[in-house]
Image (cartoon, rainbow, N blue to C red):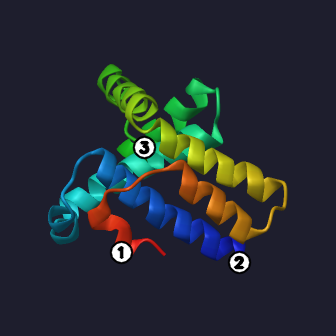
Amino acid sequence: MTNSELFSNVQVLLRKAIASRLEMPREEYDSSLDHKNAVNVFLTDVMSIAYNNGNDAAVLEELSTLHHYGEEDTPEVIEFVTKQIIFAKTKLSAEIAAFAKMHEMNQAKMAPEVTWETVQKMVSIAKEYEDCVP
């Protein structure tokens, strides 16, 4: 497994973990672009929080830019993104920890296979999603 494959596999795993955490039925996820987009937004939140560990200002700035495509950071935009961050930290903490661990192990030059095994153990997915994880 290469680092690129690891990153791709972890993204797939986390998408399924997020969909599971949101109690999104697999049939709805598979058939709805809106559901997939919602999961992708939360995946972006998870990755940003993990990469910017402890720096909420950086997370807020990054996600404001990503979610609002350069719109002015109005109080409404800041409030929306702040709620997204709070939700992610509250409901998706295992997914944030798993992505942070992957990043940490990758920086330490751990074998991708070892990192993959570690990350898989850190999150849970609904049985209905088990067949679509690499």
Q: Element type at marker 1?
A: helix
Name the disc covering residue 2, or none: 2
Type of the residue with mark 3: Gly
Q: Secondary structure at mark 3?
A: loop
- Distance between the Cα atoms at labels 3 and 2? 34 Å
- The residue under label 1 is which amino acid type? Asp
Q: Nearer the viewer, mark 3 or mark 2?
A: 2
Q: Position of residue 82 (x, y in %)?
A: 40, 25
Q: Residue at x 84, y 61 (%)?
A: 109
Q: Is residue 69 visible?
A: no
Q: Which residue is mark 3?
A: 70
Q: Position of residue 92 (x, y in %)?
A: 42, 39
Instruction: Name the secondary structure under disc 2.
Output: loop
Q: Residue at x 36, y 33 (%)?
A: 84
Q: Residues within 10 Å of mark 1 (few under 14, many from 20)?
A: few
Q: Hey, which residue is sitting farthest bottom in the picture?
A: 1
114 vs 41, left or right, is: right
Q: Residues within 10 Å of mark 2 (few under 14, many from 20)?
A: few
Vertical position of residue 14 compared to residue 21: above or below = below
Kindly identify which residue carries mark 1: 131
Does the residue at mark 3 contact the one at mark 2 (Cβ under 8 Å)? no
Which sits in the foreground, 41 or 10? 10
**Residue displayed at 34% across by 29% down:** 77
Given residues 118 and 11, the one toward you in this image is: 118
The answer to whether one can see residue 97 in this image is yes
User: Foreground mark, 2 or 1?
Assistant: 1
Name the front one of labels 1 and 3.
Answer: 1
Q: Position of residue 79 (x, y in %)?
A: 34, 22
Amino acid type at image mark 2:
Thr
Work out whether mark 2 precedes mark 1 in sequence or the reverse, and give the earlier one: 2
Disc 1 or 3, which lies upstream in sequence? 3
Q: Mark 3 vs mark 2: which is more N-terminal?
A: 2
